[in-house]
Image: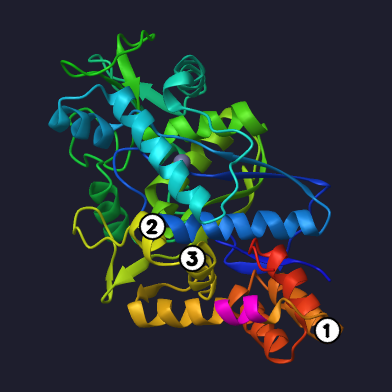
């Protein structure tokens, strides 16, 4: 059966055609706070996708970066009076523990932005030389979005919304010297006390977006099969990544499929650090089995936003228990296995796949429950 996936850039569910090796890049965290349910939804989704691709015979090379230098982590390190690298290491270890607890396998490579800076300087130099970027006298370097004319291609947002999101993500619309308000930083001089690296434009540090473009190309080459992240990264982060990467290589598309996971809310309001309305993975794993939390996440289709509820998580835990109770049996239902694969081939429809697993459990088909649950990364026996 043909696997079909939705691609954000073309706005269509399309056949996913790939060779044996699938190159997957998922934007990672800025390590300055604990993993919450929104992170978990994104990374469990890509873990399920990876396992399903492997089940289908692909070898998945997965990369998830760590943005270990940017405005947020430097600010948090200042507040704590701690070295930003030390803070980053501690938070990465905590994040890994939380995701391990959910059965998310580690990626093949976890590049650090700070370890990529020489390659980033090289890339920024190439963008300036190619006329895609311009340097100001004070050491700032900007991507020239007007020259590209494609900054809205991925998000298809109108100008007002582009500006709103640009500013909400730390972009300075009115910084002096910029050619266009949406031009984004590739390089900036470091403020007092901030880390700095030598560059053609003086000592400074990279912008957020160029870090990922360069980590992608360093780890996976000029084209990836699937580039993922949360929907909150579509603009400006992934829109910028795409322009930079395609400008550098002169070829496109940079990502054959752009795959974005919807946001998780609490009481109808998107979970975010700034609002403080977070449900933390570690807290849930103290109260529930990993399989229950994992099932709860995958009960939601990755493109549909949803709101956390204790009641629904309790129901997911009861559902997971029914799988475990049924898994001791030997019955098999090939028709249900076929439905399970049809669901996952239909843009990774995990809610339907889980409903099929429930049907297998209800039918006493223990062998089918064990087999299908394992494909989605559940330890059921
Ligand atoms: Zn990224």
Write down the region rendered in magenta: 321-325
Q: Which mark, by number, is residue 331? A: 1
Q: On the rendered structure, is 80 left or right of 342?
A: left
Nearest-to-viewer mark from 3 and 2: 3
The picture places residue 6, in percent across and down from the top left corner, at: 62, 66
The picture places residue 360, in percent across and down from the top left corner, at: 72, 85
Depth check, front residue: 27 or 330: 330
The N terminus - image quarter = bottom right
Q: Does 210 appear above or below 205?
A: below
Q: Residue at x 65, y 59 (%)?
A: 49
The picture places residue 324, in percent across and down from the top left corner, at: 63, 75
Q: Which mark, by number, is residue 342? A: none
Q: Earlier in the sequence, mark 3 or mark 2?
A: 2
Q: Residue at x 83, y 48 (%)?
A: 19
Which residue in the structure is indicated by mark 2? Answer: 281
Q: CA distance from mark 3 to mark 2?
A: 12 Å
- Quadrant position of residue 178: top left
Nearest-to-viewer mark from 1 and 2: 1
Q: Earlier in the sequence, mark 3 or mark 1?
A: 3
Q: Does 205 appear above or below 144?
A: above
């Amino acid at each position: 059966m043909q696997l079909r996936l939705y691609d954000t850039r073309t706005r269509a569910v399309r056949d996913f055609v790939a060779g044996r090796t699938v190159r997957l890049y998922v934007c990672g965290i800025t390590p300055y706070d604990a993993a919450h349910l929104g992170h978990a939804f994104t990374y469990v989704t890509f873990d399920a996708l990876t396992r399903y691709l492997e089940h289908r015979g692909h070898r998945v090379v997965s990369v998830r970066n760590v943005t270990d230098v940017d405005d947020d982590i430097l600010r948090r390190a200042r507040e704590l009076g701690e070295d930003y690298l030390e803070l980053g290491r501690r938070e990465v270890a905590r994040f890994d523990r939380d995701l391990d607890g959910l059965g998310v396998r580690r990626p093949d490579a976890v590049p650090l932005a700070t370890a990529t800076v020489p390659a980033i300087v090289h890339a920024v130099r190439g963008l300036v030389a190619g006329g895609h970027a311009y340097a100001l006298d004070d050491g700032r370097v900007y991507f020239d979005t007007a020259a590209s004319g494609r900054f809205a291609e991925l998000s298809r947002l109108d100008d007002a919304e582009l500006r709103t999101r640009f500013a909400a993500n730390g972009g300075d619309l009115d910084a002096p010297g910029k050619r266009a308000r949406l031009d984004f930083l590739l390089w900036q001089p470091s403020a007092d006390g901030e880390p700095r690296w030598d560059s053609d434009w003086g000592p400074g540090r990279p912008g957020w977006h160029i870090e990922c473009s360069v980590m992608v190309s360093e780890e996976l080459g000029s084209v990836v099969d699937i580039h993922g992240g949360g929907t909150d990264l579509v603009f400006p982060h992934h829109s910028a990544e795409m322009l930079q990467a395609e400008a550098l290589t002169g070829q496109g598309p940079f990502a054959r499929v752009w795959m974005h996971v919807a946001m998780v809310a609490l009481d109808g309001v998107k979970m975010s650090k700034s609002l403080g309305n977070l449900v933390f993975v570690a807290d849930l794993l103290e109260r529930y089995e990993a399989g229950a939390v994992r099932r709860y996440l995958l009960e939601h289709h990755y493109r549909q936003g949803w709101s956390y509820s204790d009641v629904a998580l309790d129901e997911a835990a009861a559902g997971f228990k029914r799988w475990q109770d049924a898994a001791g049996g030997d019955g098999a239902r090939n028709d249900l296995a076929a439905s399970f694969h049809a669901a996952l081939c239909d843009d990774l429809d995990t809610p339907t796949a889980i409903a099929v697993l429930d049907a297998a459990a209800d039918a006493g088909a223990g062998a089918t429950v064990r087999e299908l649950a394992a494909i989605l990364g559940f330890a059921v026996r």
